[in-house]
Image (cartoon, helix red, strand yellow):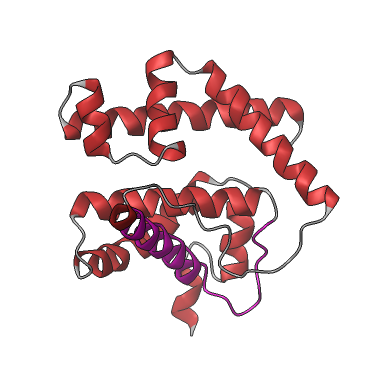
Amino acid sequence: MQHQNLRPYPTDQDLYTALRQRDERAYQHLYTETFPSFRYWMLNNSASEMDAEDAFQKGMLSFLLNIETGKYQYQPGTRVTTVIFEYGKRVWLTELKSARLRMHGAMPEVIDVADTADVVEDLERQEVVNTVRKSLGQLKDDCRQLIEWFYVDELSLREIAERLGMKESSARSKRYSCAEKLKAFYQETAHRQGL
């Protein structure tokens, strides 16, 4: 059992705490620990490498937003990697369903569905949403449009590339750099507002 102490986050509680504190290393750790097995699952469920990356990133964003707003609370004995895997899986299953229905499906709210909708939580969520809106407002038009297409309208990178008249790989790079800018603006805005 001693080798476990070599892990950067000895327990899942430590990892959850680091994620709540927006520790960049915790995001990286979660990706490194979870993405390989998630990609394997995706490739065995009629998905491409690109689909795996997209679903994982959307799932991760949804999970982090739920941590941020308090919708997701760590439960002792829960593996955080298992939870993030489930978020990604739900994104993919929702996308498959919406592709069959020819319309966009709604993002799943949380994995552990618990009715905890109280006024304080709603206000906190509203603050986060407002902060995201302000941060989006700081992006250049092309970046803002791309982020909205990808995360709000849930268009695939293929569709976005067609709209922008570029290769899919270029759209992926642009989406990544725009998301990084948005994250930086969000952290700056949240810090100023004391969130």
Question: Looking at the image, is 112 positioned above or below residue 123?
Answer: below
| Image coords of residue 12 (percent x, y) | 56, 69
Please state if 184 lies on the left or on the right of 114 as rendered.
left
Q: Quadrant for the C terminus, please.
A: top right
| Image coords of residue 171 (percent x, y) | 25, 30
Residue 88 in sight: yes
The answer to whether residue 7 is magenta is no
Which residue shows up at 66% across the image and 73% down it? 75
Please state if 150 lies on the left or on the right of 167 as rendered.
right
Question: Looking at the image, is 127 positioned above or below residue 107?
Answer: above
Please state if 171 lies on the left or on the right of 133 as rendered.
left
Residue 20 in sight: no
Magenta stretch? 71-98
Question: Looking at the image, is 120 positioned above or below residue 30?
Answer: above
| Residue at the outermost left position | 167
| Residue at the outermost top position | 140
Which residue shows up at 51% across the image and 33% down it? 183
Which residue shows up at 37% across the image and 47% down it? 103
Which residue shows up at 69% across the image and 69% down it? 114
| Image coords of residue 16 (percent x, y) | 60, 61
Q: Nearer the viewer, residue 24 or 135?
A: 135
Q: Nearer the viewer, residue 88 or 101?
A: 101
| Residue at the outermost right position | 119
| Image coords of residue 135 (percent x, y) | 57, 24
- Using the rendered view, name the quadrant where residue 10 is placed: bottom right
Question: Looking at the image, is 156 positioned above or below residue 179?
Answer: below
Q: Nearer the viewer, residue 108 or 36?
A: 108
The answer to whether residue 87 is magenta is yes
Please state if 169 lies on the left or on the right of 160 as rendered.
left
Instruction: State whether the magenta stretch is mostly helix, strand or loop.
Output: helix
